[in-house]
Amino acid sequence: MSNTNSLLADPEILRELIMDHYQYPHNHKLKEDDRYMMKHMASDSCIDDIKVQAKIENGVIEDICFDGVACTISTASTSMMTDLLKGKTTAEARKIMQNYFDMVDAKEYDGDILEEAIAFKNVYRQANRIKCATIGWRAMEELIEESEKGNE
Amino acid sequence: MFDVEKIRQDFPMLRNRPDLLYFDNAATTYKPQAVIDAVCGFWTGYTSNVERGDYETAVKADRAYDHTREIIARFINCEPKEVVFTANISHSLNQIAFGIGRWLKEGDVVLTTEAEHASNLLPWFRLQEEKGIRIEYVKVDRQGVCHAEDFRRAMHEGVKVVSMAHVTNVLGSLQPIKEIAAIAHEYGALVVVDGAQSVPHRPTDVKDLDVDFLGFSSHKMCGPDGVGVLYGRYDLLQKMDPVFLGGGMNARFSSDGSIIYKDAPQKFEAGTPNIEGVIGLGAAAEYLMSLGMENIQAYEAELRAYFAERIAKLDNIEFYNPDNTSGPITFNARGVFAQDAAGYLGAHNICVRSGNHCAKILHEVIGTDQTIRASLYFYNTKEEIDRFIEAAGNITLENAIGIFF
């Protein structure tokens, strides 16, 4: 783990990660499957327009995917989110998400559990881009809330 | 001789923030000291409400407010009573569409273009939904220009309203409004002009253009925010119903529900208006006229040509409107999302705007959704353009992401 950590401290590597996730986003195709819930994020600004889908069963996030027109920060942060939260329980996902939101709000956070998403640690310096860095994550948060409501 | 260095001294924002390169003038403009003094003068010397004041400062406020009508009348060549103050041009266009909407019937056509700002489309969309009118679009070319011959072909007896921008907000296309108005009037259609991007930059003569309605915003011409103008031909204003009802716009009303409106323009100004804003707008129009609108237009044309020639040479830039002679320089950096590129420029203290600029249906014309708009005003300089070109040449995906590290 310490090896990975030192790599993730290198700004060059972090920049490459963002570029890579932007140019070749992971899980970047929506599914035609009604077991997936979907959240369309398009009303916040006139620029980003993305759809996030998740299959959550018995409190476990089995799959996440997304699609849409968005900037590098929106696309890459959402792509990393899909990698990071897939396979996690909703409780684990909530903990990771809270750390991520704390990081982009320049609060205290646990970097270790954020893995590649640590690449967005400086986004708070460009206040106008915080929305971009959180759009996919907020979609996922809402999907988890919906799934929990459904299970009650 | 247009002494831009001397003019720049009039603008506190330019003096206080020499680090910034402000190329977002199509969104809003900096304010000269004369406008700031006019607004503060009202706040510090004669704050009062307008209308029927029986004391000295109220009379002074009333006169200053109405004096702006005379200034605007000189500015666009109309009668002072044809000048209605609104909150912004969106308000002006909503009032116009609401008022005209009451004269239209199902199947009547509003003819416009696909290059319009949302504020000149959505109010008409509502009439389509509520009254069953029809919206038709006249063809524009790749630079967004609506040619008079295409316009003539699109005209027919069913068209009751023609509504378009004099200069469009994304591509800066200058529409031949005078010819368009003449053709529209042959068919008895009303002509509505969105002057948001034209009135601040060139002489405007509503009599010469022969338009029936014109809207524009104060803040895009060095005036305060929250004030717009609605010009209307007086006979039409007198016939038109106001959107807002309330104090200041009625002559009398009684418990049986009958209302007698005041005459235009007061009929359209319900409630306490933005008094300091209107006074500031008067100062802004006086300031522009002291520089001379012809001089402003000529200087900006020179700046734009200088800018266009240089940006066209950058290999990493796709430049969408090289042939237009007015309005913003609209572009993208190849392979970089517009907001990322604007963020890169922003991180270098260069202020531009990215997005679809409230013209969401334009992408069908230029083939892209998001663009960056660099828009100039008369206080910008060739040295600033040189600095911009240097930064724009460095917009790459790597550099755009690099600002986060």
Image (cartoon, rainbow, N blue to C red):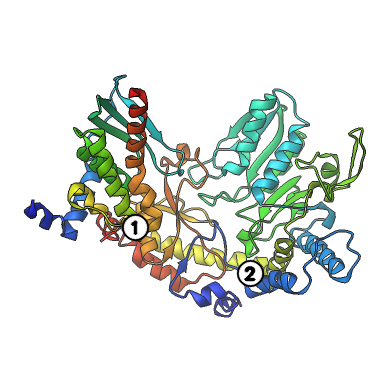
Residue B383: x and y in percent read 44, 73
Left or right: A118 in relation to A134: left
- Residue at horizontal 84 percent and vertical 70 percent from the top: B57
User: To which chain does the residue with label 1 belong?
Assistant: A
Instruction: Provide the secondary structure element on which disc 1 rests.
Output: helix
Question: At label 2, which amino acid type do we have?
Answer: Asn
Q: Quadrant of residue A103?
A: bottom left
Seen at 70% across and 69% down, the residue is B39
Q: Quadrant of residue B281?
A: bottom right
Camera-nearest residue between B278 and B388: B278
Mark 2: which secondary structure?
helix
Relative vertical location of residue A54 with respect to residue B219 in this rendering, above or below? above
Note whether B363 is above or below B291 in the view shown. above
Percent position of residue A133, x then y: 33, 48
Residue B330 in view (yes/no)? yes
Q: Which residue is mark 1?
A: A124
What is the distance, in whole Å, between disc 2 and disc 1 at their CAs?
44 Å
| Callouts 2 and 1 in the same chain | no
- Residue B382 shown left or right of residue B229 in the figure: left
